[in-house]
Image: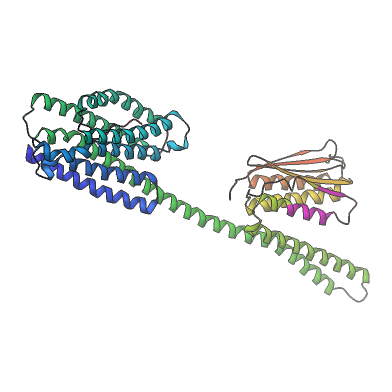
Amino acid sequence: MILFTKYFVFFFMSVSIFMFVFFLIQYIIIRKREYLCYSIYLLCLFIYYLVALPDIFFKVPLSDFGRVAPFDLFKRPVQFLSSVFYTAFILYYLGLEKMDGYLFKFFRTLIYVYIFLAMLCFGLNYKGINYDMWYYILSLTLFPLQLFVVIALFRHKVRYANYIIWGSIITLVGSSLTLTYYIYLKEHEPSNPYANAYSYLPVMVSILFDMFLFTIALQKKIADNEKSLILAATSRQQAIILERERIIADLHDDVGGGLSSIRMMSDLMSQQGEKESLHSYVSFGHKISLTAKDIAQRMHTIIWSLNSENDTVINFAEYVRQYGVSFFENSPIKFTSRNVSSLPKNVQISGVKRKNLFLIVKEAFHNILKHSHGSEASVEIFMIGNILFLNISDNGDGLPTEENINAVKFGNGLKNMQKRMDEIHGSISFQGDDGTIIKIKLTITESFPEAFFPPHGIK
C-alpha cells in the first residue's frame, strides 16, 4: 500500500507541475486572468504537498518534530494561498466580477478571508501555538455552506461552467474525505507512520478530476473559437462576394442604363437630316446633358456608399442635408433639415443601408418636387437607442387618389421605397392627410468606439 501511495503521489506531483506550465503558457497566449490564477493555484498545490509530505520527498520522519517544524510553518499558509487563487479562478472564469450580486461579493470576501487565514496560520505556527482543534471544527463547519454556494453557481448560464462547477464539487468532497480520514487515522491508528500519506489520496484524486474537467472545458472552448473563426472568415468571404455582386448590379442599373440612353439619343441626333429643326438638336442635347448629370449623381452615390469613412449616421444625415439643399435650390420649394447636429458621432451604419436610405430620400424629394405642389419640404433624422428614425414631410396635396392622374406613377415610387426598406429589414409608413409624411424606422448597430471553496487538501 505504501509503495502504491508513493508512486501515486509522485504521479500527482508530476501532473501538477506539468499542468502548471501548460496553463501558464495558455495565459501568456490568451491573456485571460483565470488561466494565470489556475496555474498559480497548481503551483501552490505542488509546494503544499512538498511541505505536507516531508517523509516521502525529503525522508524526514514525522516523529522528528524538530525537523518537521520548518515544513509545518508553511504547510497551512500555502494551503490557504492555493484556495485564494482557486477562488479567484472561479470568480474570473464565471465572470462573476461583471455581476454586482451576492455571489461576487461573497467570493471577493472569501478571498480576503483566505488571505487573513494564511497570515494567521503563519503567525500561530511561528509562535508554536497549537490550534488543530479549532482548525478542524472550522473546516467541518464550513463544508455544508461551501457545497450550497457551489451548487448555487449552476444558475449562472456561463458556457463551459458546468465542467468547472462539477470539478469544484468533486474537489470539495475530496477535501472533506481527506480531513475526515486524517482525523480517523490520527485517533484510531496514531502509531501508523503512513497515515499522513494515506489521508491525502482522496483529495489528490479529486484534484486530478478537477484538472481533467478544466482541461476539457479549455479544449472545447478553443475548438469552438476555431469554429467561430472559420465561420467568421466564411461570412466575410460571402459578404465580399455579395458586395461585388451589388456593385456590379448598381453599375449595370444606374450607369449602364444611362449610358445606353445617351447612346440612343446620340444615334437619333446623327440620323437627323438637314431639314430637321434646330429645336430637335437642342432638345436631344438637353436630354443628354440631364442624363449625364443623373449618371454622375448615381456614380457619386455608389462611391459614397462604398467609402467606409462615411459609415456613420451623422455623415449620412449631412449628406442628405447637402443633397436636399442642392436639389431644391432653384425650385419654389423651401427645404429644411432638423436634428442633424444633435446626432451621435460614434454610431455606424453600413454602406448598403446608407445607399438604400438615400435612394428612398432621393425618390421622396423627386415626388415632392414633381407631384406635391407644395411650398415646403423637410427632413428630420434622430435616434432613440440603436434605432434610427427618418421623417420626410411636405405641405403639398398629400398622397394620390385614384382620380389623381399622377396616382400610378406616384404609387410606383412608394412601392420602390417599400422594397428598399424590405431589403435592409426596416419599416416605412406613409401619411397623407395634410401634406405627405414618410416615416422610416431602422435598427442599426453602435460601434467605435472556491463559491466558498475549501482549502484544498485541508488537514
Q: Which residue is drawn at 46% across and 30% down?
A: 101
Q: Which of 11 and 160 is in front in this view?
A: 11
The residues colored magenta run 318-336
Image coords of residue 281 (percent x, y): 89, 70
Q: Nearer the viewer, residue 63 or 292?
A: 63
Number of numbered tags placed on the structure image = 0
Q: In this view, does 224 lie to the left or right of 41?
A: right
Image quadrant where residue 96 sits: top left
Relative to 346, say whether 199 is above or below: above
> What is the image's colouring?
rainbow
Q: Is residue 129 left or right of residue 194?
A: right
Q: Residue at x 85, y 69 (%)?
A: 285
Image coords of residue 186 (percent x, y): 12, 27
**In this view, which residue lies farthest toward the front?**
127
Q: Which of 138 and 251 is in front in this view?
A: 138
Q: Residue at x 19, y 48 (%)?
A: 14
Q: Looking at the image, can residue 287 be seen?
A: yes
Q: Does the magenta stretch include residue 36?
A: no
Q: Does the magenta stretch include residue 322?
A: yes
Relative to 89, say whether 23 is above or below: below
Q: Is residue 452 left or right of residue 98?
A: left
Q: Looking at the image, can residue 457 be seen?
A: no
Relative to 421, say whether 176 is above or below: above
Image coords of residue 62 (percent x, y): 10, 36
Image quadrant where residue 68 sits: top left
Q: Is residue 87 left or right of residue 255?
A: left
Image coords of residue 298 (percent x, y): 73, 60
**In this view, which residue lies farthest toward the left?**
191
Please state, as top left, top right, bottom left or bottom right, where the N terminus lies in the image: top left
